[in-house]
Amino acid sequence: MKPDSENEVVEKGHGRIETRNCKVHNQIHLLEGIEKCSDLKSVIQITSEREINEKKTNETRLYISNLNDEAEAFNKYIRMHWGVENSLHWTLDMTFREDEQR
């Protein structure tokens, strides 16, 4: 099924290149059993490719949302979420020495 919108972002830094491709599907009425999820508006697919020292890894993540938005916006929302998540882990590791607790 063709996405309703698509967006790609390339970020370079910290010795790596990361490409995130976001595809948003808003035609969810075609999904089986959708009547059970009355607030569902979008299914989002993020495909990430990370290149570190010429080694590439790929990851695909799926999200659901009650927002009806474009891929560019979802790409930003999801990146901001992971930024918060990563900073919280850094705080736990550095402040509370969580990694040292076994």
Image (cartoon, rainbow, N blue to C red):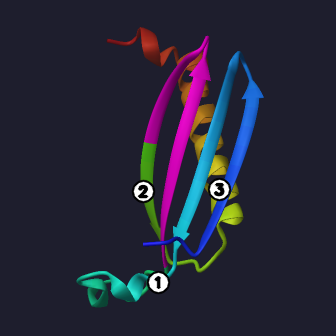
Secondary structure of the residue carrying numbered label 1 = loop
Q: 27 or 39: nearer the eye?
A: 27
Q: Earlier in the sequence, mark 3 or mark 2?
A: 2
Q: CA distance from mark 3 to mark 2?
A: 12 Å
Please give the name of the residue rendered at 65% of the width and 56% of the height, measured from the top-left corner.
Answer: 75
Q: Label 2: how many residues lie within 10 Å, few (<14), some (14-19) or many (20+)?
A: few
- Which label belongs to residue 27? 1
Which amino acid, by three-letter code, is at mark 3?
Asn
Along the viewing direction, whichever of 51 and 63 lies nearer the viewer = 51
> 10 Å neighbourhood of mark 3: few (<14), some, or many (≥20)?
many
Q: Quadrant of the C terminus?
A: top left
Q: Residue at x 57, y 77 (%)?
A: 67
As measured in the structure, the alpha-carbon distance from the residue carrying label 1 to the one carrying label 2 is 16 Å
**Above or below for 68 versus 100:** below
Give the residue pinned by disc 3: 75
Residue 30 percent location from the top left of the image:
35, 86
Q: Could you say whether the residue bearing mark 2 is in a helix, strand or loop?
A: strand
- Residue at horizontal 61%, vertical 11%? 53
The location of residue 59, given as percent across then percent down, is 44, 39
Q: Any magenta on residue 54?
A: yes
Q: Position of residue 49 (x, y in %)?
A: 55, 35
What segment carries the magenta color? Answer: 42-59
Q: Which mark is first along the chain, 3 or 1? A: 1
Mark seen at residue 86: none
Instruction: Look at label 2 and name its amino acid.
Output: Leu
Question: Going by the picture, which residue comes out furthest to the front?
Answer: 2
Q: Look at label 1 and name its amino acid.
A: Gln
